[in-house]
Image (cartoon, helix red, strand yellow):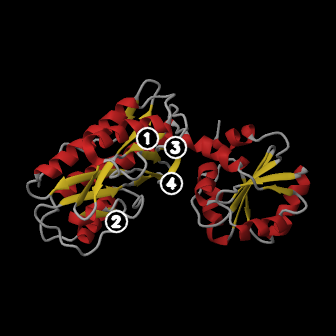
Amino acid sequence: MTNLEKLLNALPIGVDAALITSGENRFYFSGMHSSAGLLLATRDGCYFIIDFRYIEKARTTVKGCTVLMQEKLQDQLSDIIKRHGLQTIAVEAQTMTLTESNRYRQLLAPADLLCDNTLSDLIEGLRSIKTPEEIACMRQAQKYTDDGFTHILNFIRPGRTEREVALELEFYMRKAGSEGAAFSFIVVSGANSSLPHGVPGDKVIEKGDFVTMDYGGICGGYLSDMTRTVAVGSASQEQKQVYDTVLRAQKASLDMIHAGITGKEVDAAARTLIDNAGYAGCFGHGLGHSVGLEIHESPACNASSSSVLQPGMIMTVEPGIYLEGKFGVRIEDMVVVTEKGCEDLTCAPKTLIEL
């Protein structure tokens, strides 16, 4: 069953069609990457409407839809609405702006727009469970990431800047086949490593620094996400203690993951260990999140998440300790949830590396 068929089967009674406008979801349901266009899915016919820039590609790429070149959009939509007798059309309320909502109310009249979370929640549920094909793409994206780590260990040295390391890492991964950067790479060193989402700058890496790298690759549109922290030179006793605590916290959470457990239970395993080790308040973000076509997807593993993990979900597990003005440590793997545990897609070593 295709993703579109799954969506249409899940539409509640009283909803005649789904309007897909966000880029990630257009790709998810059609296989077509583009910066514009819309997909209108009805129970007995689906339409992908796109402008001249993409029409040639769409005709050979889009699956399961009639492809139309956008001309007079309101007339085209009106014809579809009349042909299929559409009365209620659900839209992606979580990603649609107020301006877009008002525009589509006009374009789709006289049909009513369902602007609650019905469609967004349905799509979120579908995307949260990865198919074997999606997992294969993410496995390859993670291989680019693992290989990048091996390469960058030989590049990092005192005198390099954070920015130089980030650029080298991205360039190497692109040359290896990654379709791009999964997100803006985080490379922070020394005191900057206490910034969970710091931006690589012109700070020069020095002997004694921790260097934290959070980055990922892309394969088939699907992303990977990994964080590693390494020491430049010999780590101090305090650095080793913090690193060991984070590593043990990650293992505690990884050992907890299985189908049926909630996100907050997985988060608690790491958070409790970190707190009991004397670092309460130094782990200020959630333990992890799902990944797919976007780097942050649902569900999440954090202190308030009651979401139940299911087989086929891909989650990150990324505890950290951040000592303001001194240094920080984060270790992140990406795993596939299974019935009785999880499969770790991340192969890069996690023992403390002293360069």
Q: Label 4 is placed on what type of residue?
A: Glu
Identify the element where label 4 is drawn.
loop
Residue wearing tag 2: 198
Of the residues tagged 4 and 3, which is closer to the observer? 3
Marks 4 & 3, CB-CB < 8 Å contact: no
In this orientation, which residue lies closer to the viewer: 328 or 6?
328
Bin the neighbour count of mark 2 within 10 Å (Cα to Cα): few under 14, some 14-19, many 20 and up.
some
Q: Label 2 is placed on what type of residue?
A: Gly
Bin the neighbour count of mark 3 within 10 Å (Cα to Cα): few under 14, some 14-19, many 20 and up.
some
In this orientation, which residue lies closer to the viewer: 10 or 136?
10
Residue wearing tag 3: 304
Residue at coordinates 8% horizontally, 54% vertically from top-left?
234
Q: Is residue 345 visible?
A: no
Of the residues tagged 4 and 1, which is closer to the observer? 4
Q: Position of residue 283 (x, y in %)?
A: 35, 50
Residue wearing tag 4: 294
